[in-house]
Image: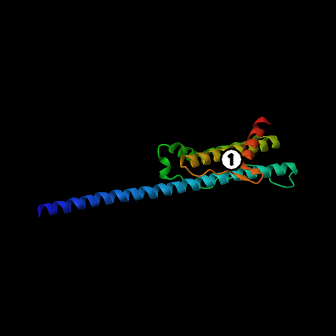
Amino acid sequence: MEHLITTVITSALVATVVGALINAWLDSRKSKHATRFDALSTAVALEGYALTCAERIADHDLAISSNGHAGTFLSGIPELPELSVVAGFLHPKKASVANRLMIFHQEIRQSDQYISFMWDVGADVEVTRSIAVSEVAHIGLKALVLATEIRSVFRLPIRELVFGEFNVRQTLESSSKEQVNG
């Protein structure tokens, strides 16, 4: 009888511990998948933002080549969509990416303030437009680099932003270099 009670108690204890471990493991897997999904959503949003920056630069180039009859001149930085930084981004290897993602809004705001300042004090419209293009290209490239790092850290598929002849990275890089060298 004593052996039966020991067996029942031991079995109940093992079942409780194993059940708790399995539940913890399942919760961890669900959390990991949710974090990867959030990372993918954030990377896609950043890539979309970089695409918007490149499109605005191309539109600005069209405005220049048509003497303002087509396209739109750049006057500031495009608005960044809402980005979420979830707790899963704060693992040791991912914390630096989370940090840069969190301060990206401030970098955009500083670039936009710089452009606004140049519009207020600059006497040469062409120089100010050139600065606006350079800042938009710089911010777009930062968004692309951040998206690429998020994809790398979370082991997500790589995405090339090439649409026919329109290569987002090349557009941003050439605009950034033209403004620095020009």
Q: Is residue 22 visible?
A: yes
Where is residue 36 shown, x and y percent of the image?
52, 54
Vertical comparison of 134 with 156: above or below: above
Up the image or down, 28 lies above or below 171; here it is: below
Task: Tell me which residue sits at (37%, 57%) in the image.
Answer: 24
Q: Which residue is mark 1?
A: 140
- Report the label total: 1
Residue plotted at (81% across, 48% down):
61
Left or right of residue 71, residue 1 in this image: left
Front one among 18 and 167: 18
Please name the residue shown 16% across and 60% down the image.
6
For residue 16, which quarter of the picture? bottom left
> Is 7 displayed left or right of 68 in the figure?
left
Q: Is residue 74 visible?
A: no
Mark 1 is surrounded, within 10 Å at the Cα level, by few (under 14), some (14 to 19) or many (20 or more) other residues, namely: many
Q: Is residue 156 above or below residue 1?
A: above
Q: Would you say 69 lies left or right of 100 here?
A: right
Q: Quadrant of the N terminus?
A: bottom left
Please name whichever residue, 1 or 107, is drawn nearer the observer in this view of the structure.
Answer: 1
Across and down, in percent, residue 28 comes to 42, 55
Q: Residue at x 55, y 53 (%)?
A: 39
In front of the other: 161 or 103: 161
Residue sitting farthest toward the top: 181
- Residue 117 position in % (x across, y down): 71, 42
Pick the front one: 99 or 111: 99
Indicate the quadrant containing the C terminus: top left, top right, bottom left or bottom right.
Answer: top right
Q: Position of residue 103 (x, y in %)?
A: 57, 45
SS for dot 1: helix
For the rendered model, the colour scheme is rainbow
The amino acid pointed to by label 1 is: Gly
